[in-house]
């Protein structure tokens, strides 16, 4: 494969600033490193938050793009997947965007939740442009030694995986936390990429009624294609939505509610919607969207409700997500979630399209 001395990248200089194109030198690859030529990288809701300066500890300027697919253009040493099979130049891969979990701290070794490791860094979010080609909105991505690459299974097109992408991986973690039992009713608040994949995975988990709540109507229609059995638009006032959904569930409320909207009010709605002894998973608040007033007696204590948070993803979520797309991609329209593709020079437009929700998912296709 032809390597280049430098590669173009779309750079976010700082909060509220315009995306600019920059040429960065190719990294010199040490043993255990690889270089990907980027095929596509997604524009995630997190990138909008990065643009708005709503994430702490971001070393601007950065190259956004945390979930991406590329072709291995160069590799140094023998790199293998979890089966021990070697990666080769020409392989089409994605990678765990989380880098540097230490396997030495309390969170990694005792609590066994690497997503809370304080040394954890994330491609496209917590690396600065000075660190090199460490974001997906670029013609090439540097796989530093230790980055976990994953080969796309045979028959899985890059865009089929990326249609789910970050939202699918996040949703898989949320579904793990939700522990849905066969036939249980589920409400999903929010019909962005995470909510859509939560709907699909709840369906694959054997849920009974799956009620999607959100806006706009086009996203609610898509949620039905993903497996929702009923939808409720946000134009229906909150109290009416709750009584409507309670009516559908024998007056009890739903067994499991997954909040994937990022709205603080949705957390209160979720607690109103869940049945006594039910479970609420909160996955929509990756950034600080502010507080909300809860009524502990009515909404939590007397209800005997269980509330679970869900933060980030680890290797297992990526690994299993690829297997799910390989087996279920013909039944679940993940590929259809990508509504528009943008070259690097139009990355700013892509960001705007996601911010104003004119597309469900935008993809950056560098070349
Ligand atoms: Zn650690
Ligand atoms: Zn993301």
Image: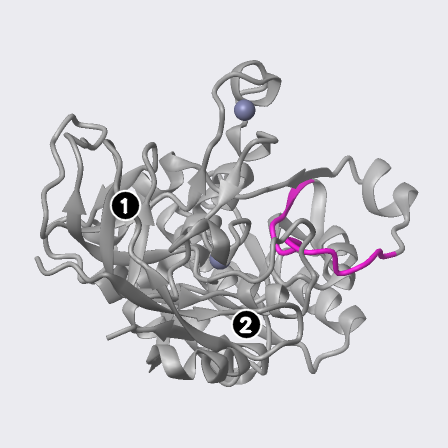
Q: Measuring from the top left, give residue 209's x and y in whole percent.
A: 50, 57
Residue for point 16% across, 48% down: 74
Q: Quadrant location of residue 30?
A: top left
Where residue 71 sits, quadrant-wise, is bottom left
Q: Is 290 part of what is drawn in magenta?
A: yes
Front one among 309 and 200: 309
Note whether residue 331 is visible: no
Model colouring: one colour
Residue on which the image places disc 1: 28
Mark 2 or mark 1, which has the lower sequence index? 1
Task: Classify mark 1: helix, strand or loop.
Answer: loop
Please tell me which residue is depicted at 27% across the width and 57% down the height of the picture.
Answer: 69
Q: Is residue 201 above or below residue 10?
A: above
Q: Is residue 273 in view?
A: yes
Please give left or right for residue 166 compared with residue 309 in the image: left
The local crowd at label 2, few if under 14, some if 14 to 19, many if 20 or more residues have their Cα within 10 Å, is many
Stretch in magenta: 278-292
Numbered label attached to residue 326: none
Please tell me which residue lies in front, 210 or 194.
194
**Pointer 2: what residue?**
231
């Amino acid at each position: 494969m032809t390597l280049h001395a430098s590669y173009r990248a779309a750079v976010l200089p700082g909060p509220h600033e315009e995306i600019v194109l920059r040429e960065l030198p190719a990294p010199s690859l040490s043993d255990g490193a690889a270089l990907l030529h980027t095929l596509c990288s997604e524009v995630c809701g997190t990138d909008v938050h990065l643009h708005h300066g709503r994430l702490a500890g971001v070393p601007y300027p950065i190259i956004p793009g945390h979930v991406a697919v590329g072709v291995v253009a160069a590799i140094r040493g023998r790199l293998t997947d979890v089966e021990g099979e070697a990666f080769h130049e020409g392989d089409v891969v994605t990678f765990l965007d989380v880098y540097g979990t230490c396997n030495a701290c309390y969170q990694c070794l005792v609590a066994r939740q690497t997503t809370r490791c304080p040394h954890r860094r994330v491609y496209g979010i917590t690396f600065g442009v000075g660190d090199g080609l460490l974001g997906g909105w670029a013609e090439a991505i540097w796989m530093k030694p230790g980055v976990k690459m994953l080969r796309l299974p045979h028959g899985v097109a890059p865009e089929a995986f990326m249609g789910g992408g970050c939202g699918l991986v996040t949703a898989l973690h949320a579904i793990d936390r939700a522990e849905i039992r066969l036939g249980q009713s589920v409400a999903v608040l929010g019909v962005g990429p995470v909510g859509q994949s939560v709907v699909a995975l709840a369906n694959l988990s054997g849920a009974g009624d799956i009620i999607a709540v959100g806006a706009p109507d086009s996203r609610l229609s898509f949620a039905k294609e993903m497996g929702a059995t009923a939808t409720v638009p946000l134009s229906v006032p909150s109290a009416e939505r709750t009584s409507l959904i309670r009516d559908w569930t024998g007056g009890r409320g739903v067994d499991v509610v997954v909040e994937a909207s990022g709205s603080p009010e949705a957390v209160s709605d979720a607690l109103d919607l869940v049945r006594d002894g039910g479970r609420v998973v909160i996955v929509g608040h990756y950034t600080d969207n502010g507080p909300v007033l809860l009524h502990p007696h009515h909404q939590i204590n007397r209800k005997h409700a269980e509330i679970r948070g869900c933060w980030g993803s680890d290797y297992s979520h990526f690994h299993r997500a690829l297997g799910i797309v390989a087996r279920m991609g013909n039944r679940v329209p993940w590929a259809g979630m990508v509504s528009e593709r943008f070259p690097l020079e139009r990355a700013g437009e892509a960001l705007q399209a996601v911010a104003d929700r004119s597309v469900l998912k935008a993809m950056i296709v560098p070349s």
